[in-house]
Image: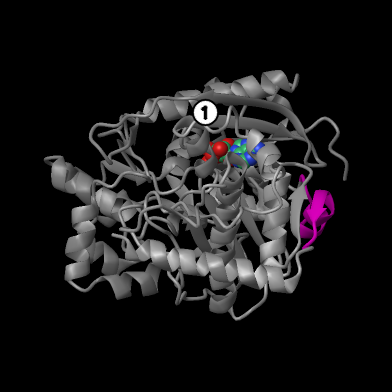
Amino acid sequence: MQHNDKYILALDQGTTSSRAIVFNQTGVVIGMKQIAFNQIYPKPGWVEHDPFDIWQSQYDAAVGAIDEAQITPSQIAAIGITNQRETTLIWDRKTGKPVHNAIVWQCRRSSHICQELKALGFEPEIKARTGLILDPYFSGTKLVWLFDQIPGLRDRAERGELAFGTVDSWLIYNLTGRHATDATNASRTMLFNIREGRWDQEILRMLKIPEAILPEVLPSSADFGYTRKDLFGCEIPVCGCAGDQQAALFGHACFQVGASKNTYGTGCFALMNTGSEPVESRHNLLTTIAWDLGKGYTYALEGSVFIGGAVIQWLRDEMRLLSDSAESERLARLVKDTGGVVLVPAFVGMGAPYWDAEARGAALGVTRGTTKAHFVRAALESVAYQSRDLLDAMERDAGASIPFIKADGGASANSFLMQFQADVLDKPVILPEVGEVTALGAAYLAGLRVGYWSGLDELERNWRRKRDFMPEMAAETRDRLLERWSKAVEVTRLFK
Ligand code: ADP
């Protein structure tokens, strides 16, 4: 069916900005608005957001996107939400007033709580039930911190006066008045049993979290309520919800088992669809819910490279070797290789499969003849090597081969990087025509629910490639480069 005068609005609530995008039925962007908001750093390693900043910037972005699309709110068939994950909020159910700033996923304030839980031997149980490693990154111990720090909070929670939520829940509450989340966001709290599909009683007991505070968990494509009339002048159904990385996997139409995407942003986030069975990782990857279309979960393996595009930011802002990020491509192409230089950007430790928090960066093989171009090329290559390590671990965990990688994110604009990635993976790397795959994924989830799109087949047909990067490197060259990289990682990790 054609929906010529109807559109889907995606709300993409990120860590540094709120974005809203209006899509048409072919998945084309019709209007977009992005609003940055304030980051709060109360202490080193701590990160907070003002919950009202999150809401206000997201609402203003939605109004702005509708305006830019030159449509009226009544032409929005449904709203889909995607969001920064794990960020933790508690608010009063009646007044909507938060009890504290949002504790952002990056915030390390609950490290000591994780250490205590590890010492008590809880980690294997938590991993088996939630698919996650015991880390301050996830919501569970952030919530414990709030209960420990705010007097009377637990009593109020037990009386049912308070609501906990990740950012999706906070937006849904403000949009519709409901207290709900979806399975992908629930799977990042460290409180949700991803096999049984319910809040895990055992973990709630371990962490002393009152169940009354938790949101209802719905599928990712479901009825989350209608927007309050005063917001847009009409009631719009909110019908889609997924965490940002899962939404990107969906927006890339990675519907088949083995289908994988890598997002090249500040860090890199790789997800592989593992189908209806959760795969437990032996290489420090996370097991997570990819989506729930109401017919059982699709699971994914997930891993991240901490320093991806950020290595280019570093060369630009700290080392001052680049005037802008795009210049990295021009420089890398000036030389035929790195002249033997290997850069291991373990600036904040190394993620999967190494998971080495103490490691720090290194540049190896530097000579008197090393130029800026060699160094910049080594930095770009390091993004591809780290991603390869991650994807290799995924294949080994899943016991299946990844046929090709779909790519997005700021650094995917770098064609040198994309080609080098295809070369070291020995797999095609594919760029989609619509780069806004995260928002598109949220739009798809919402549109499916209201019949705007007929099903996954139509979404697959909607997916159009912009460019394929085919592997061209000779096998001997690849093997030699990968061996040098592995050696460099080994040496780097010895230096502590
Ligand atoms: P995030 O959403 O994580 O903030 P983006 O997807 O916007 O990140 O990507 C920004 C990152 O991509 C930055 O770290 C930047 O250095 C990098 N980047 C942007 N353009 C290029 C480019 N042409 N080549 C390499 N890196 C780039």
| In front of the other: 455 or 43 | 43
Which sits in the foreground, 75 or 8?
A: 8
Q: Position of residue 121 (x, y in %)?
A: 21, 74
Q: Which residue extends farthest front?
A: 368
Residue 79 visible here: no
Q: With respect to residue 75, does 253 lie above or below?
A: below
Q: Which residues lie in the magenta part?
A: 452-471
Residue 446 image-quadrant placement: top right
Give residue 337's position: percent from left, percent from top. 66, 54
Left or right, 81 with respect to 27, comes to: left
Is residue 455 on the magenta stretch? yes
Above or below residue 127? Residue 410 is above
- Which residue shows up at 33% across the image and 45% down it? 164
Q: Residue at x 51, y 48 (%)?
A: 267
Q: 202 or 370, which lies in front?
A: 370
Can you tell which quarter of the image residue 469 is in? bottom right
Image quarter where the C terminus lies is bottom left
Q: Amino acid at mark 1?
A: Gln
User: At 73% across and 73% down in the image, what residue appears?
Assistant: 475
Residue 462 is covered by the magenta coloring? yes
Above or below residue 108? Residue 321 is: above
Q: Circle 1 is placed at which residue position?
A: 58
Image quarter of the N terminus? top right
